[in-house]
């Protein structure tokens, strides 16, 4: 009877070892769960970026307002009859490299 009990305890200890520390044990499960959570966050951020790009594509294909805005911002487009003013700051208004208020 003692031998049978000893064998059962050894078997239980071996199973516990595999459960807690072995390959595909609880530590591996926790690592995989964390990796999955991080990947889902990354996927969600990429989905939001893709949706933004799709909306921009729709704007560019459906109307001229988005194209005009892009031309104004990126190419400096000015409509005929508009007056363009560029404001250049004075040298004394710009902080020097060592003169920061931090």
Image (cartoon, rainbow, N blue to C red):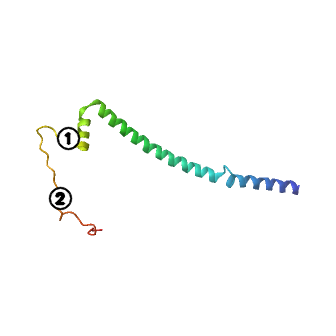
Residue 54 % position (x, y):
37, 36
Residue 88 % position (x, y):
17, 56
The answer to whether residue 93 is left or right of residue 34 is: left
Q: Is residue 62 above or below residue 71?
A: above
Q: Which residue is more in the foreground, 32 or 13? A: 32
Q: Is residue 79 above or below residue 88?
A: above
Q: Which residue is more in the foreground, 33 or 8? A: 33
Disc 2: which residue: 89
The quadrant in which the C terminus is found is: bottom left
Residue 34 % position (x, y):
55, 51
Residue 71 % position (x, y):
24, 39
N-terminal label among 2 and 1: 1
Secondary-structure class at tag 1:
loop
Residue 44 image-quadrant placement: top left
Q: Is residue 79 above or below residue 23?
A: above
Q: Is residue 88 above or below residue 101?
A: above
| Alpha carbon distance from label 2 to label 1 | 22 Å
Q: Residue furthest front?
A: 75
As drawn, the label of residue 23 is none
The answer to whether residue 97 is left or right of residue 82 is: right
Secondary-structure class at tag 2:
loop
């Amino acid at each position: 009877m003692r031998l049978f009990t000893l064998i059962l305890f050894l078997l239980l200890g071996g199973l516990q070892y595999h459960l807690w520390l072995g390959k595909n044990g609880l530590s591996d499960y926790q690592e995989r769960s964390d990796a999955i959570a991080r990947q889902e966050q990354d996927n969600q951020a990429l989905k939001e970026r893709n949706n933004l790009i799709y909306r921009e594509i729709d704007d560019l294909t459906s109307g001229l307002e988005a194209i005009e805005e892009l031309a104004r911002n990126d190419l400096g487009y000015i409509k005929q009859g508009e007056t363009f003013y560029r404001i250049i700051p004075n040298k004394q208004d710009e902080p020097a490299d060592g003169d920061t208020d931090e």
